[in-house]
Amino acid sequence: MNIATENRKELDDLFSLTYEELRRLASSVKRGDRSNTLNPTALVNEAWLKLANSPGILTTSPLHFKRIAARAMRQLLVEAARRRGAGKRNIEGSPVITFDESLHGAFTSDQDLLGLNAALDELAELEPRQATIVESRFFGGFEMNEIAEMMGISEATTLRDWRVAKAWLGHKLSKAL
């Protein structure tokens, strides 16, 4: 077996370890977005295609791979929303994005997703760790202990940053109305 074939097998094994969890997450993110045309399987598969050629992906832990896949799914959802012409105001009114502990994100429109994406980008400039926590939690379905482990911080710090980030995003998104 040559090195390329071995690397491909390792990458396939890594994907297999996280596929069902990524699909579950994609399903919960998609559930609230009536305008999203990507089904959970397509979202996970698109994320996989995006990741498959990434250099160094094989050296990551399954937890870190899941984090990278969450970012890829976020990017894919945002790209799809932009393609659908999300610059228009939604007719139904204000954005509704929840940050509850169950992580069943409720996007009522592409505008909601794009608003969250822009707010997360702004938060990343101000507080990168908090933005990583929100992205990991909201798009990656990570538990607090997984985030703490991945980031090398205590669970208490992770919880504190999560609460602050939720408050900041809630304020930011409510001002966007």
Image (cartoon, rainbow, N blue to C red):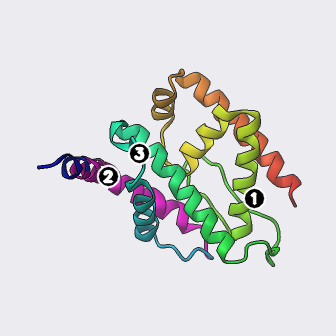
Amino acid on which disc 1 is placed: Gly
Disc 3 on helix, strand or loop?
loop
143 horizontally vs 127: left or right: left
Q: Which residue lies under the disc numbered 2?
A: 15
Span shown in magenta: 8-34
Which tag, 1 or 2, sits closer to the chain's start? 2
Q: Is mark 1 on a helix, strand or loop?
A: helix
Quarter-of-image position of residue 76: bottom right
State if disc 1 and disc 3 touch (CB < 8 Å). Answer: no
Q: Give left or right: position of 117 versus 145.
A: right
The answer to if 137 sits in the magenta stretch is no
Q: Residue at image x 52%, y 58%? A: 73
Name the residue that disc number 3 marks: 55
Give me the disc on residue 99.
none
Position of residue 41 measured from the top left corner of the image (x, y, whole percent): 40, 68
Above or below 159: residue 25:
below
> What secondary structure is the stretch in magenta mostly built from?
helix
114 or 21, which is in the foreground? 114
Q: Give the numbered dot on residue 115.
A: 1
Q: Is residue 31 covered in magenta?
A: yes
Label 1 vs label 2: CA separation? 30 Å
- Of mark 3 and mark 1, the one earlier in the sequence is 3
Instruction: Say which residue appears at 26% left-offset and 53% top-offset.
Output: 12
Q: What residue type is labelled 3?
A: Pro
